[in-house]
Image (spheres, rainbow, N blue to C red):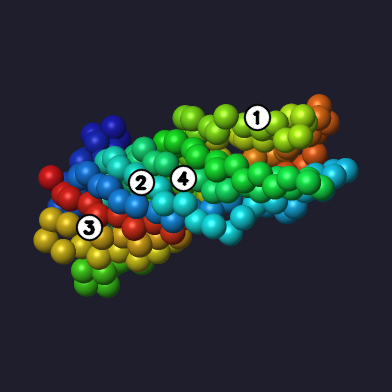
């Protein structure tokens, strides 16, 4: 019985190695990102996110595991993203640029159509560095509370030509980037989320 199980396991492994293709490579690219959240109003202060986009960069490693026209594309990327938050009072208006450095780990399922791919999957992000957080507006301390890890999704199109892989993806959040904002020692809900349009070029080893 054990020998039969070993024989079946060897057959499965041989079949996978015969019909699948595994490739590794490096990739880099740019992104256009922004932060979205509902406005927070407290006393004379209103905090809102701006639609202005910020250009970010990313780079790292990726792989493609293909079999019979479908496959997985896991990635490990160091990326920078951000957005802008505006804080208004009765007499002042302050714009704070929010910049983040993250370790992104997307795992995309793709379907091939010739050299083209349609891809979708989850992405986990670990925030390595956050904005300075604290602002002082008219003598009032205002602090954004950001989470150290978030989960989201990516969806897009890819194109593999020779040793190059081109990807254009949209990334949205499933969890909160920021959970609250602190104004003068009192906390208020501030469900902020980061959205990106990502373009990258990869090179297979």
Which residue extends farthest front?
Answer: 91
- At horizontal 22% and vertical 72% (from top left) the residue drawn is 114
Earlier in the chain: of badge 1 and badge 2, it is: 2
Q: Along the horizontal axis of the image, is 138 left or right of 42?
A: left
Question: Which label lies toward us, 1 or 3?
Answer: 1
Which label sits in the foreground, 1 or 2?
1
Q: Who is closer to the viewer here, 85 or 9? A: 85
In this view, the residue farthest toward the right is: 43
Q: Earlier in the sequence, mark 4 or mark 2?
A: 2
User: What residue is drawn where x is 73% and y is 45%?
Assistant: 92
Residue drawn where x is 13% and y is 45% of the image: 205
Left or right of 178? Residue 26 is left
Looking at marks 2 and 3 on the same chain, the residue that comes earlier in the sequence is marked by 2
Q: CA distance from mark 4 to mark 2?
A: 7 Å
User: Residue 23 location in percent, x, y?
Assistant: 19, 48
Q: Residue at the spot x=25%, y=47% of the render? A: 27
Q: Nearer the viewer, mark 2 or mark 3?
A: 2
Q: How many marks?
A: 4
- Numbered label attached to residue 165: 3
Mark linked to residue 134? 1
């Amino acid at each position: 019985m054990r020998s039969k199980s070993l024989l079946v396991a060897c057959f499965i492994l041989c079949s996978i190695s015969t019909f699948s293709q595994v490739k590794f490579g490096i990739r880099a690219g740019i992104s256009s990102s922004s932060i979205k959240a509902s406005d927070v109003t407290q006393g004379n202060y209103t905090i809102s996110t701006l639609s202005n986009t910020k250009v970010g960069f990313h780079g790292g490693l990726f792989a493609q595991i293909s079999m019979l026209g479908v496959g997985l594309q896991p990635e490990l990327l160091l990326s920078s993203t951000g957005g802008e938050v505006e804080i208004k009072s009765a007499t002042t208006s302050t714009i704070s640029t929010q910049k983040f450095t993250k370790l992104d780990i997307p795992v995309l399922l793709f379907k091939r159509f010739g050299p083209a791919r349609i891809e979708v999957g989850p992405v986990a992000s670990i925030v390595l560095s956050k904005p300075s957080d604290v602002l002082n507006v008219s003598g009032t301390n205002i602090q954004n509370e950001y989470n150290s890890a978030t989960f989201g999704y990516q969806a897009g199109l890819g194109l593999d030509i020779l040793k190059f892989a081109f990807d254009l993806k949209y990334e949205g959040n499933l969890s909160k980037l920021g959970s609250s904002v602190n104004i003068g020692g009192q906390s208020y809900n501030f469900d902020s989320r980061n959205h990106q349009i990502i373009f990258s070029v990869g090179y297979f080893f």
